[in-house]
Amino acid sequence: MSDCLFCKIVARTIPAPLVYEDDLVVAFDDINPQAPIHTLVIPRKHVVSLAELQDSDAELLGRLLLVGSKVAKLKGIAEPGYRVVVNTGSHGGQSVFHLHLHVLGGRHLAWPPG
Ligand code: 5GP
Ligand code: ZN
């Protein structure tokens, strides 16, 4: 999608600190980190949100979570633990409408979220 920020990061027309990439997904550090480690994992293809996923996206969704786990290992937070968040829609706090996983860690994270 031509006017989507994260599609531009996938296309490398906007720079971002890449952490990992493969044929289906790209991971890069968040520009406004909410924890010492804050990395976003996104599909290369434009999907608006979790709410828009189709049954045919099962492999993509699996890959996103697997890469979230891989990123946590790469960043050294698999132990003592981390959080994966998918903000969805207005009440979910989503601000960029290209599906993304937040991988957050490096400090104790409070629960419940605000
Ligand atoms: P959301 O609020 O949609 O769940 O998360 C969007 C995230 O994208 C936010 O945490 C925000 O800081 C991050 N973000 C927004 N613009 C950019 C950008 O240009 N580069 C990077 N690396 N992250 C961004
Ligand atoms: Zn997009």
Image: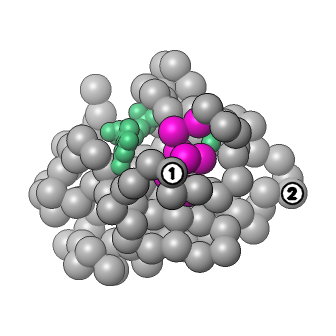
Looking at this rendering, what residue extends furthest in the right direction? 56
Q: Amino acid at mark 2?
A: Ser
- Residue 58 can be seen, yes or no: yes
Name the residue tied to disc 1: 13
Quick one: SS at disc 2?
A: helix
Query: On the rendered structure, is 53 left or right of 18?
Result: right
Q: Which quadrant of the figure has residue 82?
A: bottom left
Residue 95's disc number: none
Q: Residue at x 50, y 33 (%)?
A: 96
| Quarter containing the N terminus | top right
Q: Amino acid at mark 1?
A: Thr
Relative to 62, is 5 above or below?
above
Q: Residue at x 83, y 47 (%)?
A: 54
Looking at this rendering, what residue extends furthest in the front direction? 13
Which one is nearer the viewer's eye here, 60 or 79? 60
Q: Which residues are magenta?
A: 4-10
Q: Position of residue 63 (x, y in %)?
A: 63, 70
Relative to 83, is 87 above or below?
above
Q: Position of residue 112 (x, y in %)?
A: 29, 36
